[in-house]
Image: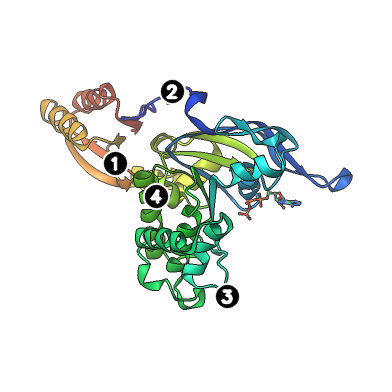
Amino acid sequence: MTATLGQTVEPESNSADALVRLDAVSKVFGKGDDQHRALSDVDLDIRRGEIFAVIGYSGAGKSTLVRLINGLERVSSGTVTVDGVDITSLSGKPLRAIRRRIGMIFQQFNLMRSRTVFGNVAYPLQLAGLSRAEQEDRVAELLSFVGLLDKAWAYPEELSGGQKQRVGIARALASEPDLLLADESTSALDPETTRDVLALLRRVNEELGITIVVITHEMDVVRTIADRVAVLDAGRVVEVGAVRDILGAPQAETTQRFVAATVGNRPDAGRLQQLRDTYDDTLVTVAVSDERAFGSVLSAAARDHGVDFEIVYGGITDLKHESLGSFTLALRGPDAGVRATVEALNAAGIVEGTKR
Ligand SMILES: Nc1ncnc2c1ncn2[C@@H]1O[C@H](COP(=O)(O)OP(=O)(O)OP(=O)(O)O)[C@@H](O)[C@H]1O
């Protein structure tokens, strides 16, 4: 029994709300014996207004994917469409026009050391031909959005990692992009600074309506910020869906490894065996995404059937807008009562597994 409360089936993606679409994209580097296939047959829709994460281990093809979306790299086969325009056949001016609508932030920030914070953020505006007065107004607005107005005249080397990434975000926003690509944008930062930068990215998404693609090897980043996630393994998308569904019921082995690293609330096989050795009761694991429903179903069933319960494992994992919990319970009482309690929990669709 693997029903999970709150699990929803994602509607088939509608191409009308896809800001970025990859159709059967493959990318092969090198020639002849030196060939290396970085991406194989990748289909993805990134919807307007969402935060979409791509997670994968080193070498999975994440950076290649980003470089194909912003036109820095060409597909070997397939198509990449940005806002309805197939960019695989574009070059020169039309490609540059599309690329201006895509902002990018990097793991190592990529700021110009010889320029102040102002100079870095103003750079794309200067290239776009804005007057000095226009640049000043826009940079002040951007720096105040990222909380760094007081650092306008500092040089990058005088800033912390988190501050450098804020400058990177302000610079990426300067040309008012529709899409922001964040390639391992928090991988060089400590956990607290990571939280601040992720919170800022959420504001970019929610207040400015910018679609964000987050490339990461950390499920914690996905969990905190993303609406949907694609799992990339050896150049292939092995799983894609809403973050709550992927974290609640990961299917592919790679996904299960990523999920185990961030969601510690389900007992693995070894821990389950230990629990069975310790508790001579029926063990049942329930998924919880609405605590009141879970609590009332459990306490009513236990009361009606004369059953006691003890929580022996579990916890709550916070997602962007909701929580995902899992509890393993030891049920104690008359056999028929325990069976009836498990049935009641099953009927409520919250049982993930049962062990006698
Ligand atoms: N320009 C290139 N020439 C040859 N091979 C490349 C090139 N760029 C990437 N690759 C190969 O393609 C595969 C995917 O690389 P990519 O950098 O996209 O992975 P990644 O998931 O971003 O990894 P990491 O997190 O380590 O950067 C790797 O095996 C890499 O060696």
Q: Nearer the viewer, residue 192 or 303?
A: 192
Q: Amino acid at mark 2?
A: Pro
Q: Which mark is residue 11?
A: 2
Which of the pair 321/332 is nearer the observer?
321
Three-letter code for the amino acid on which mark 4 is drawn? Val
Which one is closest to the eye, mark 4 or mark 1?
4
Helix, strand or loop status at disc 4: helix
Residue 186 seen in render: no
In the image: residue 284, left or right of residue 334? right
Give the x, y percent position of residue 140. Answer: 38, 63
Q: Which residue is mark 3?
A: 114
> Is the residue marked 1 within 8 Å of ligand 1, measured from its CB?
no
Marking on residue 327: 1
Residue 67's tag is none
Q: Are marks 3 and 1 in contact (CB under 8 Å)?
A: no
Query: Which numbered disc, 4 or 2, marks the residue that appears first in the sequence?
Result: 2
Q: CA distance from mark 3 to mark 4?
A: 27 Å
Dot 4, crowdedness within 10 Å: few (<14), some or many (≥20)? many
**Real-space CA distance between mark 4 and mark 2, rounded to the nearest whole angstrom:** 26 Å
The residue tagged 4 is 204
| Classed neighbour count for the residue bearing mark 2: other residues with Cα under 10 Å, few (<14), some (14–19), many (≥20) | few
User: How far apart, in angstroms, are the residues tagged by discs 1 and 2?
Assistant: 29 Å
Mark in the foreground, 2 or 3: 3
* 311 relative to 111 in the view: left or right: left
Which residue shows up at 67% across the image and 48% down it?
Answer: 72
Q: As drawn, is 107 to the left or to the right of 296?
A: right
Q: Quadrant of the C terminus?
A: top left
